[in-house]
Image (cartoon, rainbow, N blue to C red):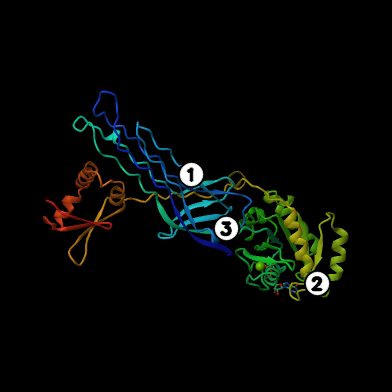
């Protein structure tokens, strides 16, 4: 399988900080709280752009950091939400979390979107914390940090060109001599059981992706043989290269073969027959091939170009490749609607990790280490320069059961507790 792969860092924007402010009114020495909330941080969103073909751009830009939300302001003004960061990716991009290997998104259709990393919510301003007991709190939250992660993007190359034909006509042999692909080649039918892809480069520096498909036989569209399940792979190909065994060595008539395969393509009904076809008359090194080709040309009604070649002796290949490259260039893509036409559709995975409340471990020096995504986030959202905020943090730890859990693990008055880089004293 031909795969382009790249590892990228993405981070959602942090939420804006909430504000501590108070109303200043005439004749009121100290007004009520008036600190606004921070705005949302931006999400990093991937969107499919039909025109893109490779992940090349991501080799140069490997960091995607979405902007943060605006901070809250006085007079209860909400900070502005940041605008999401939309990154264009080619169709066929699969996005996985680098740590867990989990699939985050499978992006197929033009315009399809997936949130890759979420922005943080804005911190609340002090207006939101007013209570009858504390009508003027000096307390606000900092913005929630945006989610961050390393992802692996994989692009399953979609074939520009599909090789179709009966079994053993030499499709795999042809692919093997025009690309670096190493498909299995043998004299028995159905040697190829899964499609092989190869990058073909022409003498003048152009390139396209060619797929070698399992052989088709009569009834393939109804599931006879192996070919039909792989016809799906040529849904997106722009050019069909129809390979015909012109030697007739297996006792079939080349023209009958040609009609049979075209009928199968038509029956499969993915508008496959609307694609331009190029005919390859293969095995021209064999004795009867010239004569058969002459008869074939007399019978054929369509004016598809015909290229006599021998994949084995590598005759006639460069003319063929130039013609294929020309056709790929001048043929636009065939947009398809997978759900409607084939009943096939891909699943979009959403990644929502179960969050543990917290975790307590112990360092060799006896320090208690408190960790866990939820607690760490809470910590980052606390403005420790304000006493009200610090007190709220302590209350929240207690409500999560952190104090009890520490006590259970033997923590005593004066013991050191560490959270991220910061150390506290345990006060019982
Ligand atoms: N004489 C001659 N034999 C060829 C030529 N191309 C392929 N062959 C032979 O034909 C046989 C089948 O070749 P493959 O390339 O495996 O054929 P295929 O079309 O991929 O067959 P399936 O995968 O079974 O559908 C092998 O024995 C090849 O060596 C050619 O140009 N001349
Ligand atoms: Mg093959």
Which comes sooner in the sequence, label 2 or label 1?
A: 1
The picture places residue 286, in percent across and down from the top left corner, at: 80, 75
Residue at position x 41%, y 41% in the image: 70
Distance from disc 2 to disc 1, alpha carbons, whole Å, reads 58 Å
| Disc 2 target residue | 284
Tag nearer the camera, 2 or 3: 3
Residue 138, compared with residue 50, is above or below; it is above
Q: In terms of depth relative to the viewer, which is nearer, 378 or 401?
A: 378
Residue at numbered disc 1: 84
Q: Is mark 2 within 8 Å of ligand 1?
A: yes
Label 1 environment density (alpha carbons within 10 Å; few <14, some 14–19, many ≥20): many
Which residue is at the front of the view, 301 or 248?
301
Q: Position of residue 422 (x, y in %)?
A: 25, 56
Q: In the structure shown, which secondary structural element does the residue marked by tag 2 occupy?
A: loop
Q: Nearer the viewer, mark 2 or mark 1?
A: 1
Residue hosting label 3: 57
Helix, strand or loop at mark 1: loop
């Amino acid at each position: 399988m031909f795969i382009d792969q790249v590892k990228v860092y993405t981070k959602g924007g942090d939420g804006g900080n909430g504000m501590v402010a108070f109303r200043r009114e005439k004749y009121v020495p100290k007004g009520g709280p008036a600190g606004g909330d921070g705005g949302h941080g931006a999400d990093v969103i991937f969107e499919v752009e039909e025109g893109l073909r490779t992940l090349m751009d991501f080799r140069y830009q490997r960091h995607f950091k979405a902007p943060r939300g605006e901070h809250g302001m006085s007079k209860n003004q909400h900070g502005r939400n940041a605008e999401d960061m939309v990154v264009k990716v080619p169709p066929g991009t699969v996005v996985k979390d680098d740590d867990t290997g989990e699939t985050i998104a499978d992006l197929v259709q033009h315009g399809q979107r997936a949130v890759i990393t979420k922005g943080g919510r804005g911190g609340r301003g002090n207006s939101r914390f007013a209570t009858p007991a504390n009508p003027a709190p000096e307390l606000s939250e900092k913005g929630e940090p945006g989610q961050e992660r390393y992802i692996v993007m994989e692009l399953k190359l979609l074939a520009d060109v599909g090789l179709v034909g009966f079994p053993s006509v030499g499709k795999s042999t042809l692919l093997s001599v025009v690309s670096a692909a190493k498909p299995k080649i043998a004299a028995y039918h159905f040697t190829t059981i899964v499609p092989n892809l190869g990058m073909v480069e022409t003498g003048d520096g152009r390139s396209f992706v060619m797929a070698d498909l399992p052989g088709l036989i009569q009834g393939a569209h109804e599931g006879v043989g192996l070919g039909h399940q792989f016809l799906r792979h040529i849904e997106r190909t722009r050019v069909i290269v129809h390979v015909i065994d012109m030697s007739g060595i297996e006792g079939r008539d080349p023209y009958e073969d040609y009609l049979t395969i075209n009928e199968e393509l038509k029956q499969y009904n993915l508008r496959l027959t609307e694609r331009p076809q190029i005919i390859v008359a293969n095995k021209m090194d064999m004795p009867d091939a010239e004569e058969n080709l002459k008869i074939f040309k007399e019978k054929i009604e369509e004016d598809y170009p015909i290229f006599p070649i021998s994949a084995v002796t590598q005759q006639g290949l460069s003319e063929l490749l130039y013609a294929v490259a020309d056709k790929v260039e001048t043929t636009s893509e065939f947009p398809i609607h997978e759900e409607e036409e084939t009943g096939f559709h891909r699943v979009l995975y959403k990644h929502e990790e179960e969050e543990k409340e917290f975790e307590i471990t112990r360092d060799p020096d006896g320090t208690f280490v408190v960790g866990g995504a939820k607690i760490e986030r809470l910590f980052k959202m606390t403005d420790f320069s304000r006493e009200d905020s610090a007190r709220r943090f302590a209350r929240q730890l207690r409500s999560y059961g952190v104090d009890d859990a520490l006590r259970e693990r033997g923590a005593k008055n004066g013991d050191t507790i560490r959270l991220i880089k910061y150390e506290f004293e345990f006060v019982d």
